[in-house]
Image: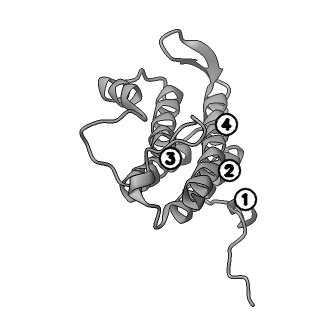
Amino acid sequence: MANNKLPEFWLRGPLSDIPALLQPVAYALLQAREELNALMIAFPDELLWNKVAGMASPGFHLQHLTGVLDRLFTYARAEALNEEQLSYLSTEGKPTTKIYNAIELVEVFKKQVDEALTQLSNVDETTLTDFRGVGRAQLPSTIIGLYTHSAEHTMRHLGQLIVTVAVLKSR
C-alpha cells in the first residue's frame, strides 16, 4: 500500500515568501493548521466542550490557539491589545449563548494562521532582536521571542488537543 502522506512542513523545502530566520515559525504554524484540520474532521460537536480528567476541552484549545496567536503577533507589532482581543481572551473556553461547532473554530484558526504568515512575510530580519513588551506589565521579550513562543505554544496546545480528542472519541 502506498503512503500518500506528505512529510512534515519543515521537510517540504523553504517557503519563498518567509524570511529565512522565521521559517521554523511558519513551518510550525502550517503543520499545526494541517494537523488540526485533519484531527477535527467529523469531530462530534456535542463533545466540543467536554473535558477529560478536568483538563481543557477541545473547544477551549481551539479558541485559545486562535487567541494566543492573535495576541502574540499583536505584541510583535508593538501594539497593545484592543477591546475585542481582551473580550475574546476573557471568554476563551467559557460557555456562551453562541453555538460553536468544531469546523467553525478550525476555520477561524486557519484564518489566524494565514494572517500570521502574512505578517511573517513582511518582517525585516534585522529587527528580530528588537524589544517588545508583553501584556499590561510590558514583560520583556523580543520580536523573535514572540514569534518563537507563538510556534511552540501552538504546538503544545495542539498536542494536548490531539490527546483530548482521542480520549473523547474513544468513550
Residue 27 appears in the rendering:
yes
Q: Residue at x 63, y 57 (%)?
A: 31
Circle 2 is placed at which residue position?
A: 23
Q: Nearer the viewer, mark 4 or mark 2?
A: 4
In the drawing, does residue 3 fall left or right of residue 17?
Answer: right
Q: Give how far across and how far down residue 41 sits, in percent.
A: 48, 66
Mark nearer the N terminus (1 vs 2): 1
Closer to us: 111 or 5? 5
* Left or right of 8 on screen, residue 41: left
Amino acid type assigned to the residue bearing label 2 in the image: Gln
Placement of the N terminus among the 4 image quadrants: bottom right
**Contact flag, marks 1 and 2 (Cβ < 8 Å):** yes
Q: Name the residue under label 1.
A: 10
Task: Examine the image and state in which quarter residue 125 appears.
Answer: top right
Q: How far apart are marks 4 and 2 (CA)?
A: 10 Å
Q: Which of marks 4 and 3 is nearer the N terminus?
A: 3
Location of mark 4 (residue): 148
Q: Name the residue under label 3.
A: 58
Residue depicted at 45% across the width and 49% down the height = 109
